[in-house]
Image: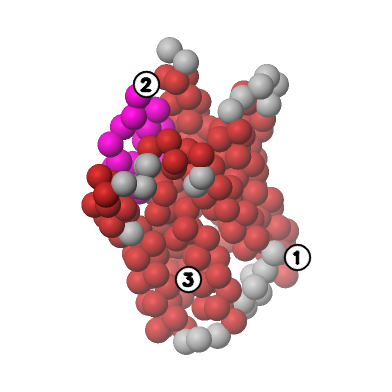
Amino acid sequence: MYLYLSLALTVSAGIGFGYGLYRFFRDKSALYVQMIVFGVGCAMLGRLFTTLLYLVNGELNDGFNVGMLGIIGSFLFFFSANYGQMDSIVDDGSTKFRKTRIIALAAPVTVAAIWCVIAATSGINALSIWVGIEMLFVALASYFHLKHLIIEDVSFGLIRAIRSYNLLSLVYALLCISEVLVDVLNLPAAFSVIVCVLECAVLLAFIPVLERGVKKWTT
């Protein structure tokens, strides 16, 4: 079953990545958008490795596997897209946005709390350590996703246009963490199926939702 779930995620991410290449790399597009497309591409490569590992070994390794780099790469691209130029446009560092910055910390704090549950359940071992490293990048990206979801909009509706994308990214972060949580807590297989179906839906929706938002920048 896990082989088929991993295959479904690989295909969904592959479709999303392929569509992103078609829409945003034929002509000159904003680097922000292209980085997100590369993030989906990293998800595809990570899931592809996981699928091949299931196919060859029948199970995943305890602790680190190369597929984790796909998740790390995804959220590193998502983080890089929002950090820096995009964030400086919406947040000038003044006290005006202090409350927003504090509220946005709820996202990484939630990620950290879930890792504590995983560590408390499985112990401090190879799995919890590598998952912790993976979740560090999820936490970094999730902070900016939540921040840009709730922050006051700027001229031309720049942030409002991509709020749906940031919401999807937050959901995807939660789902990636839930995958590990379901496994560690030994929850019924139905939970894995539900998480997988939702992840597939998000991976397929990423680029179309982003495309719709980007169009608002130029209209």
Q: Nearer the viewer, residue 184 or 150?
A: 150
Q: Quadrant of the N terminus?
A: bottom right
* Quadrant position of the C terminus in the picture: top left
Say what secondary structure mark 3 lies in.
Answer: helix
Q: Which residue is mark 1?
A: 56
Measured as percent of width and height from the top left, residue 179 is found at 47, 62
Q: Residues within 10 Å of mark 2 (few under 14, many from 20)?
A: few
As drawn, 116 above or below 197: below
Q: Secondary structure at mark 2?
A: helix
**As shown in the figure, which amino acid type bears the numbered disc 1?**
Val
* Chain-order first, disc 1 or disc 3: 1
Relative side of 145 to 100, left or right? right
Amino acid identity at mark 2: Phe
* The stretch drawn in magenta includes residue 35: no
Of residues 103 and 195, the one nearer the viewer is 103
* In this rendering, position of residue 218 left or right of residue 67: left
Q: Residue at x 51, y 72 (%)?
A: 132
Q: Which residues are magenta?
A: 146-166
**Do residues under tags 1 and 2 come within 8 Å of each other at their CB atoms?**
no
Whether residue 132 is visible: yes
Report the residue marked by disc 3. Answer: 183
Quick check: 205 above or below 58?
A: above
Magenta stretch contains residue 162: yes
Label number found at residue 122: none
